[in-house]
Image (spheres, rainbow, N blue to C red):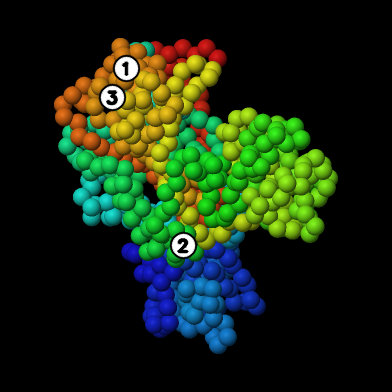
Amino acid sequence: MSYKTHTCGELRLEHAGRHVTLAGWVHRRRDHGGVIFIDLRDRFGLTQVVINPANVRSPEVFAQAEALRNEYVIQVEGVVAQRPAGMANPKLATGEIEVIAHDVTVLNPAKTPPFAIDDDGRNVDENLRLKYRYLDLRRERMARNLIIRHTFVKFIRDYLDARGFIEVETPILFKTTPEGARDYLVPSRVHPGCFYALPQSPQQLKQLLMVAGVERYFQIARCFRDEDQRADRQPEFTQLDLEMSFVDRDDVLNLIEGLFTEFTERYAHLHGKRLSFKPFPRLTYEEAMERFGSDKPDLRYGMELFDVTAETRGSEFLPFRVAHVKGICAAGCAGYTRKQADELTEFARRQGAKGLVVLWHDPDGIRNTGAGAKLSQAEKDGIVAKAGSKPGDLILLVADDDRRVVNTVLGELRHELGERLKLADDGVMAFAWIVDFPLFEWNAEENRWDPSHHMFTAPKDEHLPLLETDPGSVRSKQYDLVCNGYEVGGGSIRIHRRDVQERVMRLIGLEIEEARRKFGHLLEAFEYGAPPHGGIAPGIDRLTMLYCGEPNIREVMAFPKNQQAMDVMAGAPSPVYEQQLKELHIRLAL
């Protein structure tokens, strides 16, 4: 027996008169004077079912229909009919028809759910939604998100397959890898005292696949990082992992740009998304920081940083006299009160600023209060010119001896004001590339150089001579794909020669013996003819979040953890039995 001849989303006027069988969940039930209307739901849509005592095969059927409640699982047999004149529902794909029921069978009754299923769930406590995730996923919005994710992943597979890539799975149980976060460790029963690590990414393995001659590899890879949670982060996540041999930077960038351009134009527009730039802009790391104060700038709006260090040099206003001074202009915000300005000042301090200079641009010039009263007219004119400010605008300035602090604080302020003023177009996917990152960053606490990306990233060829003499000036072959204020993918051209890899390891303080112990398999592989290679790892969850217009990645994952990295549905993590610990040769000391 087939439970259904059609889905609840496919019947149309051309099916009128056809005898059909549907099955699904009672989405809504309405009793109109002895005639019961049911909106029957499955993953594919809704169909209106009319249960009239004059049409059902027996009074018992109608009595059973009267007892139906939301979320009951039922089967309906009946005939498709055109809805009466004026009763069509243009919001439904099936809105021109209804099914006149002859028989109704309850396949499974349901308790009253802890929350309504027929809304988008945004006003329901998230922990409650996660506890009953199997109910939450019945919502139209959540089902749509899973479908968009599926479409995205299928497109990726087809796109890369057509370009000579093969999908290769790599181990989940592996060795610890230096990816910048804590590993999740898995104890070994047969090797007491030894642990596997869940991969933060398949970094070493995909490089070894290049040594193996695979040339074009990809994987929809599961990755694990034990780090603090936030809106775009989960302890386990999925990325498109991709590596190519005999390539340089532009080969990787052009391939990935083509992938996201084609997907957005072919599918994402169906969900109200469109590209902002084609081709994607390419900004150097330095340019991104100077113009936007961020290496993942949201390019859906302007409000770029401007520099007035020269205009304020030697100012009578002491904070400006010898510092780097930069600012942003908030158009139309001169109506901000002193209280609102103080809130922005406190926000800037939390980001690391010593303070925030707020200037109101009135019709007759910069308001002569606060810092505005301490600046000369020439300084005010210079600031207005650099800001591109007009009467009615608000100018925000940050000064510090450290230019990086100035840029970072203004970048955060730019983002905050962009949110407050709703400057970003939600329908836009503003992709861009950030390139030419520093290869190293100075770790003052440890008094050493750390890799900015990871230690396998190649330096630019012309900067190889600077490795030992001027590490801070070395630029890398790293590249990040950013979109709407998020880093959505990072990659690099890799080091493929053992001598260069060992030079980098020495520079970051990794003794060669320790390096051989941790990465000897990779270093040895480089001596067997490793080709030039590089890759990238766009985040599936983060990109799906943006394509779906959701505020966090939990909304596009079937069974995510909450903000405390807990699975509140299953109760994980959980204690284990003492016998299990004994088998693993582990004793707890809490």
Seen from the viewer's position, the closer of residues 46 and 539 is 539
Residue underneath mark 3: 500
Instruction: State the residue at coordinates (70%, 34%).
Output: 314
Residue underneath mark 2: 274
Kind of element beneath mark 1: helix
> Where 170 falls versus 392 (above or below)?
above
Q: CA distance from mark 1 to mark 2?
A: 46 Å
Disc ID at residue 235 = none
> Where 77 falls versus 298 (above or below)?
below
Seen from the viewer's position, the closer of residues 27 and 77 is 27
Instruction: State the residue at coordinates (59%, 37%).
Output: 408
Q: Position of residue 409 (x, y in %)?
A: 63, 38
Kind of element beneath mark 2: strand
Q: Amino acid at mark 1?
A: Ala
Q: Position of residue 69 (x, y in %)?
A: 58, 61
Which of marks 1 and 3 precedes in the sequence? 3
Residue underneath mark 1: 515
Q: Position of residue 114 (x, y in %)?
A: 62, 50
Q: For residue 71, which quarter of the picture?
A: bottom right
Q: Callout 1: 10 Å neighbours few (<14), some, many (20+)?
A: some
Kind of element beneath mark 3: helix
**Residue extending furthest bottom?**
85
Seen from the viewer's position, the closer of residues 534 and 166 is 534
> Where 63 falls versus 468 (above or below)?
below
Q: Is residue 132 visible?
A: no
